[in-house]
Image (cartoon, helix red, strand yellow):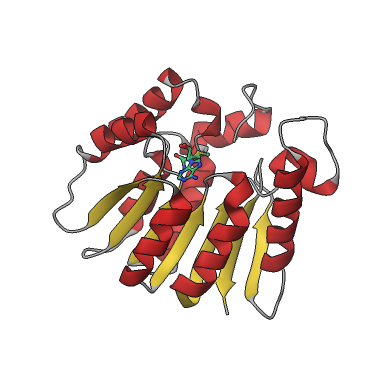
Amino acid sequence: MRESVLSNKEEYLNSLFANESENKKLSRQFAEELGLARISVSAPEAKLISLLVKLHGCRKFVEIGTLTGLSAQYIFESLPDGGELWTLEKDPAHGEKSAAVFANLDQSPKKIHLVMGDAREELEKLSALGPFDGVFIDGNKAAYMDYLLWAEKNVRRGGLILADNVFLSGSVWGDRSAQKFSDKQVRILQEVNQRLADPNLYEGVIVPTFEGLYVAIKK
Ligand SMILES: C[S@@+](CC[C@H](N)C(=O)[O-])C[C@H]1O[C@@H](n2cnc3c(N)ncnc32)[C@H](O)[C@@H]1O
């Protein structure tokens, strides 16, 4: 999730890393049209996610929260031939835009599955296709713990867990000036962060991007 005014640091990073393909620009344009450009992943953060997926050699990957298919494209391009990405979205308007974007991608050597519906229900059905090599959590904040517990069961040992917006605009350390999040959302993100920091369960760290990106390996 992004603020509309970019800092000098963000402008600089974008000048280096925001040279995106036409199809990624289309995802951004669709997000803009929906009035949701600020919740698309930034280009530098998307590059980091893409790099991690590649470094980890992920073949079977799950994304929760497609929006207009931007982060999905970054993940997809890092999968090897034969790789598969399942990306989950509940809003039909977002799904329609994502489907249009995915139709422009060459899906002969690898595949994107756009899964429409509430992620909590759809994840249960996806379990039959696991275990997965990694997950990117970027959906409904109040459901982050459910997503994480699903990942604990369905991502392989040593698999990659990524979760965006884990700072919740500073709410998790008590800065409530943004006033965007409910007490329930804040409590859930604090619990998720605490769980991901448990060395018995995960090896990980929060990368201090603008909104905080949790990067962890499941033990
Ligand atoms: C932050 S946006 C995802 C941004 C996207 N990953 C990107 O950077 O290109 C969150 C998305 O999650 C979707 N979402 C919210 N609640 C959901 C749910 N219960 N199940 C599935 N998707 C959900 C929203 O409709 C929205 O499109």
Horizontal arrangement in the rendering, residue 213 relative to residue 59 (left or right): right
Residue at the image point whose x is 63% and y is 45% from the top: 165
Q: Is residue 129 above or below residue 184?
A: below
Q: Quadrant of the C terminus?
A: bottom right
Give coordinates of residue 218: x percent, y percent: 56, 74
Residue at the image point whose x is 21% and y is 43% from the top: 105
In the foreground, 121 or 139:
121
Give coordinates of residue 24: x percent, y percent: 35, 34
Give coordinates of residue 91: x percent, y percent: 41, 35
Horizontal arrangement in the rendering, residue 194 relative to residue 5 (left or right): right
In the foreground, 90 or 57:
90
Res. 141 in view? yes
Residue at the image point whose x is 61% and y is 32% from the top: 2
Q: Is residue 86 above or below residue 73?
A: below
Q: Quadrant of the N terminus?
A: top right
In the foreground, 143 or 22:
143
Res. 21 in view? no
Kindly give the residue lying farthest to the left in the view shown: 108
Q: Is residue 109 above or below residue 16?
A: below
